């Protein structure tokens, strides 16, 4: 069974309509993903269990349960923007070595046949995917139609390859307004900003980026970008540092729990009304 056909099992029932699919997808070799010859129901169960908000198929699926209680643990949410890129695979390798989960805010134009394996690997390994627009414009500057297009095209591109319907988004540059809030509310996505900016987009210095994470507090949402080589080099250092402080690495949804569409979130304990 080819992977493209298998993924259609997971997509069935989504409230977001997936159009203009790429026909037959290539058979990809993804670490942790069962071989394409596997019974399609078993593969769909694996993928669905990795993303708790996927629509339930017509057969039993074991619920995802990590037993993470961020009220008792020192949780932080590592987030990576602007990928997937050439460096993303190495970031995933490092996260796997530390047993760390993260959230990847995906730019739609970066989603294609080449990057599909990375996106599918993220899902299988328990990471979360979020919407970061189609091509990274400042969303408040757009007309309502253009804003809708930025969000919908990205949702459809990611859904086409993974079956994931993303429930959170991050506005490029952190730029948002009432119009963006209204549109994200319409599409059922909360706005995830950040409480700790590593400034890796400005300072391409791995040591400096890692040191900025010394300021991390329980509940922080940490901003990074998986498209910079310096960021990739900083991830092992910052994880070693945060490991020693007893932090647990969770996805944004694990950190925040249920979020309100359109609402801005900077931290697990702080919200800003829109």
Image: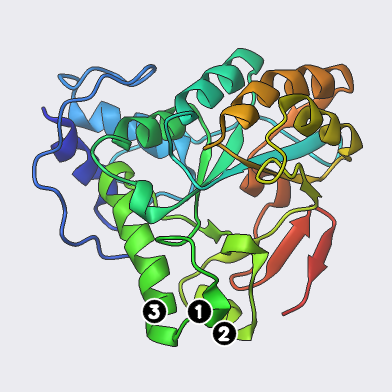
Query: How busy is the neighbourhood of tag 3: few (under 14 within 10 Å), some, or many (20 plus)?
Result: few
Q: CA distance from mark 2 to mark 1?
A: 6 Å
Which residue matches tag 1? 183
Query: How busy is the neighbourhood of tag 2: few (under 14 within 10 Å), some, or many (20 plus)?
Result: some
Which residue matches tag 2? 179
225 displayed left or right of 109: right
Query: How busy is the neighbourhood of tag 1: few (under 14 within 10 Å), some, or many (20 plus)?
Result: some
| Label 3 secondary element | helix
22 displayed left or right of 254: left
Q: Nearer the viewer, mark 2 or mark 3?
A: 3
109 displayed left or right of 73: left
17 displayed left or right of 23: right
Which residue matches tag 3? 146
Above or below, 54 against 206 in this view is below
Q: Are marks 1 and 3 in contact (CB under 8 Å)?
A: no
| Label 2 secondary element | helix
Labels in figure, total: 3
Q: CA distance from mark 2 to mark 3?
A: 12 Å
Find residue 240 and report its horizontal and vertical position in percent.
Answer: 78, 16
Find residue 61 and report its horizontal and vertical position in percent.
Answer: 39, 35
Q: Are marks 2 and 1 in contact (CB under 8 Å)?
A: yes
Residue at 48% x, 26% y is: 125
Task: Kindly indicate the quadrant of the structure image that contains residue 79.
Answer: top right
| Label 1 secondary element | helix
Q: Nearer the viewer, mark 1 or mark 3?
A: 3
Return the disc, 1 or 3, that comes first in the chain's sequence. Answer: 3
């Amino acid at each position: 069974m080819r992977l493209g056909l298998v993924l259609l099992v997971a997509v069935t029932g989504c409230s977001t309509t997936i159009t203009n699919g790429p026909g037959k997808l290539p058979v990809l070799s993804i670490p942790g993903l069962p071989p394409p010859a596997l019974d399609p129901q078993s593969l769909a169960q694996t993928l669905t269990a990795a993303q708790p908000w996927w629509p339930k198929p017509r057969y039993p699926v074991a619920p995802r349960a990590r037993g993470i209680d961020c009220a008792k643990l020192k949780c932080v949410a590592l987030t990576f923007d602007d990928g997937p890129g050439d460096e993303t695979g190495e970031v995933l390798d490092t996260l796997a070595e530390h047993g760390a989960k993260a959230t990847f805010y995906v730019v739609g134009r970066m989603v294609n046949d080449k990057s599909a394996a990375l996106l599918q690997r993220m899902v299988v390994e328990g990471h979360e995917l979020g919407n970061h627009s189609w091509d990274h414009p400042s969303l408040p500057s757009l007309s309502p139609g253009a804003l809708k297009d930025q969000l919908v095209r990205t949702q459809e591109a990611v859904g086409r390859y993974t079956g994931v319907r993303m429930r959170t988004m991050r506005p490029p540059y952190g730029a948002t307004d009432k119009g963006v809030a209204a549109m994200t509310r319409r599409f059922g996505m909360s706005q995830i900003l950040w409480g700790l900016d590593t400034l890796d987009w400005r300072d391409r210095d791995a040591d400096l980026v890692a040191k900025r994470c010394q300021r991390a507090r329980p509940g922080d949402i940490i901003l990074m970008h998986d498209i910079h080589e310096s960021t990739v080099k900083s991830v092992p250092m910052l994880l070693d540092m945060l490991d020693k402080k007893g932090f647990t690495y969770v996805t944004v949804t694990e950190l925040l729990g249920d979020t309100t569409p359109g609402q801005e979130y900077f931290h697990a304990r702080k919200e800003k009304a829109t």
